[in-house]
Image (cartoon, helix red, strand yellow):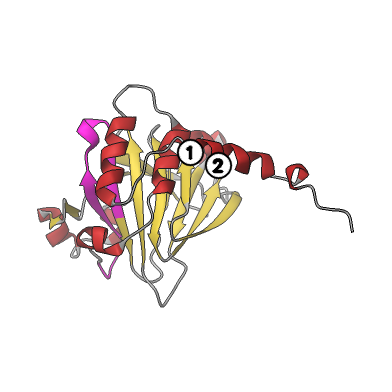
């Protein structure tokens, strides 16, 4: 039998490139190492998307290191600030209880990096609605569905479309680490059935492991009153 030429396989070339890049990534053994390296990666104004993805991929999730940020709410998933990256970005941990998901949202012209720290997440990407959907109702088009498991890393920005994230499991929680650069305070939220949009404010359930005043009262608010990303 002829030997399989892996170099001709789809995606194999990319894997080699990724492996080469990973050789230049410093040792990242703890979440603190990752936070330090991310600050260094964002020390200039240029955002090297591949580099940031590689750094996030190099960290192997250790629950003992991030447990204090993983604060769950039974009503909706929570956003928990981990680091503000000298004002250049927000690094946060999102805690998804069983079956919880986000609305369809944009990313406010920011870079969005995400790494799964525990459990599984499903990302459903949508095309931007057409201009005419402002007047008429148009079901939004799904362009991609990706299933992510612990330690997977992904990247998103507005040029790639819109998305919704969800924990598809009804028996297991999920936790993910997100980096948004530059930070933003509101996003556009979309109705899948009509394509209509509204603006939603983003808030933190906790900061640096300490619950925020908003976090304490948010359980009483209706789910429509605030939204995550
Ligand atoms: Fe997002």
Ligand 1 has an atom within 8 Å of the beta carbon of the residue at disc 2: no
In the image: residue 227, left or right of residue 157: left
Q: How packed is label 1: few (under 14 Cα within 10 Å), some, or many (20 or more)?
A: few
Q: Mark 2 points at which residue?
A: 19
Give the vertical position of 65 relative to 91 (above or below): below
Which image quarter: residue 8? top right
Element at badge 1?
loop
Tell me the quarter of the picture where residue 72 sits: bottom left
Residue sitting nearer the eye, 85 or 128: 85
Residue visible at 29% across and 52% down? 30
The quadrant the N terminus occupies is bottom right
Q: Which residue lies furthest to the bottom in this view?
A: 171
- Rendered residue at 54%/34% (across/down): 131
**x and y, in percent, of residue 80 in the image:** 23, 53
Q: Do the residues labelled 1 and 2 touch (CB within 8 Å)?
A: yes
- Up the image or down, 109 lies above or below 168; here it is above
- Magenta segment: 73-93
In-front residue for pair 143/128: 143
Task: Identify the residue at horizontal 48%, vertical 40% (top origin).
Answer: 22
Reply yes or no: does residue 90 show up in magenta. Answer: yes
Which residue is the site of mark 1?
23
45 relative position to 136: left or right = left
């Amino acid at each position: 039998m002829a030997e399989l030429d892996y170099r001709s396989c789809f995606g194999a070339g990319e894997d080699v490139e990724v492996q080469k890049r990973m050789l230049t990534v410093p040792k990242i053994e703890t979440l603190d190492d990752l936070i330090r390296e991310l600050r260094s990666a964002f020390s200039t104004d240029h955002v090297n998307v591949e580099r940031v993805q590689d750094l996030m991929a190099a960290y192997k999730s250790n629950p003992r290191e991030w447990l204090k940020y993983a604060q769950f709410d039974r009503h909706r998933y929570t956003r928990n600030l981990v680091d503000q990256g000298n004002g250049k970005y927000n690094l946060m941990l999102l805690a998804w209880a069983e079956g919880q998901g986000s609305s369809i949202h944009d990313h406010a012209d920011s870079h969005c990096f995400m790494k799964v720290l525990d459990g599984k997440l499903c990302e459903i990407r949508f095309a931007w609605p057409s201009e005419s959907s402002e007047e008429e109702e148009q079901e939004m088009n799904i362009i991609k569905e990706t299933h992510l498991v612990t330690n997977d890393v992904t990247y998103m920005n507005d040029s790639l479309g819109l998305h919704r994230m969800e924990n598809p499991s009804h028996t297991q929680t999920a936790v993910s680490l997100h980096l948004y650069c530059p930070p933003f305070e509101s996003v556009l939220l979309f109705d899948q059935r009509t394509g209509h949009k509204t603006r939603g404010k983003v808030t933190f359930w906790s900061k640096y492991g300490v619950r925020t005043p908003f976090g304490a009262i948010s359980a009483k608010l209706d789910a429509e009153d605030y939204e995550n990303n």
